[in-house]
């Protein structure tokens, strides 16, 4: 049997982002999407380099998995050489049609769905911390879908010299529809809506419908859909799958708008991250400033004074000292209160711990204390998880507990 492929593809900036960091490749029989991440414009750079490298390698006959590894090397090397792009990365989800079979290379939290008959299945794993928790049985799919840290990736392309890229295949049947999409689509749009859109005969119409649906649901992130529909060739002499000769690598222009300055390389969905943690963040410097006010002495009058003057000055000085002490007492109380409301995840004797307070010291005095210890060693963490610990970000108690659970510390 010979299958013919028809495709539709579209990307959209969404309603809340200033740039579109998604890129797609339509170069039949290769189709791919990359969802970039990183501070400033680095996400766009990463997804663009990955897409171009992948397309060029496949075009010159490199096997799909090796082409994806070349894309990893290209992004990684670029990040090493450019300040401001270090830590950038991207998802990469690629489909290569080979006769009546599909090959996939996949890393990150973009998704591949297969519609076969009336059943829709996600056939890729999400390489995200919540995706791993679902696979380990610690979280339901429903809980993962609304989890505040759902955008933190456990694997990405370009962030390390060697990437762990999934590779798998699928025998295709006539009527199969494949969807590659970024999390800006799979997040807001339900499986039922995806299924309904993919039943459209025209793949471009299906892609447009999916983008519309994601926008209708708030469009919190960049949205990309590549839809490939496989049908039986009209007769045996028909041309092989999707014989369009065009290569399309769509890197949407960001219009020169000031980019997102978030420097968290693994948080691709700033809006989602905001919900959980950042609202509770406070600047440690402010807390330290409040504590340091006690280093300020009251100015001593150096002039020789008459006894009366001296008495009046002395009374006034006592008043000033009392006022300063009162202010200091309030500041100290506020600082102590503040320190009791903030937490961070750090390392104690090589093992993960939740600390109460801020990760600073005033002279020899630490402004934090161990709140909870765990048996999980720092060395046992993945590089991604380590960056979450290394940043020692201030969180509220719930936020710190949640992160500690994600890192495998006891619940
Ligand atoms: Ca995204």
Image (tube, rainbow, N blue to C red):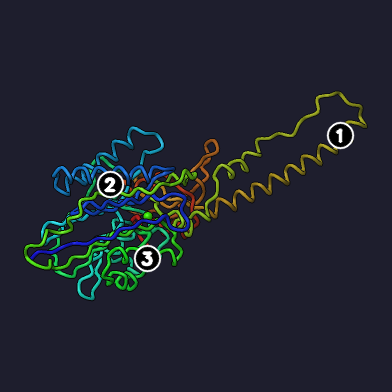
What is the number of callouts on the image?
3
- Nearer the observer: mark 1 or 3; the answer is 3
* Labels 2 and 1: the sequence-earlier one: 2
Residue 147 image point, x, y percent: 40, 63
Q: CA distance from mark 3 to mark 2?
A: 27 Å
* Labels 1 and 3: the sequence-earlier one: 3
Give the residue number, with chain letter if any, for mark 3. Answer: 145
Q: CA distance from mark 1 to mark 3?
A: 67 Å
Query: Who's the residue at 38% across and 59% down the image?
Result: 184
* Labels 3 and 2: the sequence-earlier one: 2
Query: Who's the residue at 42% across and 57% down the image?
Result: 221
The tag on residue 351 is none
Query: Who's the residue at 24% across and 39% down the image?
Result: 73
Give the residue number, with chain letter if any, for mark 1. Answer: 313
Q: CA distance from mark 2 to mark 1?
A: 75 Å
Relative horizontal placement of residue 173, taking residue 318 as reference (left or right)? left
Ligand 1 is found in which quarter of the picture? Answer: bottom left
Give the residue number, with chain letter if any, for mark 2. Answer: 51
In the picture shown, does residue 239 fall above or below 195? above
């Amino acid at each position: 049997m010979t299958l013919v492929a028809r495709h539709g593809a579209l990307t959209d900036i969404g309603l809340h982002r200033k740039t579109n960091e998604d890129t797609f490749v339509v170069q039949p029989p290769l189709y791919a999407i990359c969802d970039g991440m990183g501070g400033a414009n680095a996400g766009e750079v990463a997804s663009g380099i990955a897409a171009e490298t992948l397309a060029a390698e496949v075009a010159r006959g490199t096997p799909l998995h090796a082409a994806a590894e070349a894309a990893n090397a290209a992004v990684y090397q670029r990040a090493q050489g450019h300040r401001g792009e270090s830590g950038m990365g991207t998802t990469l989800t690629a489909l290569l049609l080979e006769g009546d079979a599909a090959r996939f290379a996949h890393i990150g939290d973009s998704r591949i769905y297969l519609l076969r008959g009336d059943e829709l299945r996600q056939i890729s794993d999400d390489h995200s911390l919540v995706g791993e928790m679902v696979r380990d049985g610690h979280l339901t799919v429903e809980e993962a879908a609304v989890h505040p840290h759902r955008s933190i990736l456990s694997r990405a392309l370009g962030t390390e010299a060697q990437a762990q890229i999934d590779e798998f295949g699928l025998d295709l049947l006539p009527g199969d529809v494949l969807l590659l999409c970024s999390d800006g689509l799979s997040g807001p749009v339900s499986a039922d809506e995806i299924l309904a859109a993919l039943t459209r005969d025209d793949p471009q119409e299906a892609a447009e419908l999916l983008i519309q649906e994601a926008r209708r649901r708030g469009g919190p992130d960049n949205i990309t859909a590549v839809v490939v529909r496989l049908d039986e060739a009209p007769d045996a002499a028909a041309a092989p799958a999707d014989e369009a000769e065009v290569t399309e690598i769509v890197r949407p222009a960001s219009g020169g708008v000031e980019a997102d300055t978030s420097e968290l390389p693994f948080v691709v969905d700033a809006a989602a991250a905001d919900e959980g943690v950042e609202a509770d963040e406070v600047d440690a410097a402010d807390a330290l400033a409040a504590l340091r006010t006690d280093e300020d002495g009251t100015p001593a009058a150096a002039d020789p004074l008459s006894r009366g003057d001296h008495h009046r000055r002395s009374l006034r000085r006592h008043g000033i000292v009392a006022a300063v002490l009162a202010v200091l007492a309030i500041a100290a109380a506020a600082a102590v209160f503040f320190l009791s409301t903030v937490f961070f995840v750090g390392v104690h004797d090589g093992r993960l711990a939740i600390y109460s307070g801020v990760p600073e010291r005033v002279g020899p005095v630490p402004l934090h204390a161990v709140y909870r210890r765990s048996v999980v060693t720092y060395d046992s963490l993945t590089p991604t998880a380590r960056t979450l610990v290394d940043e020692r970000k201030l969180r509220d108690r719930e936020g710190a507990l949640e992160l500690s659970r994600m890192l495998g510390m006891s619940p």
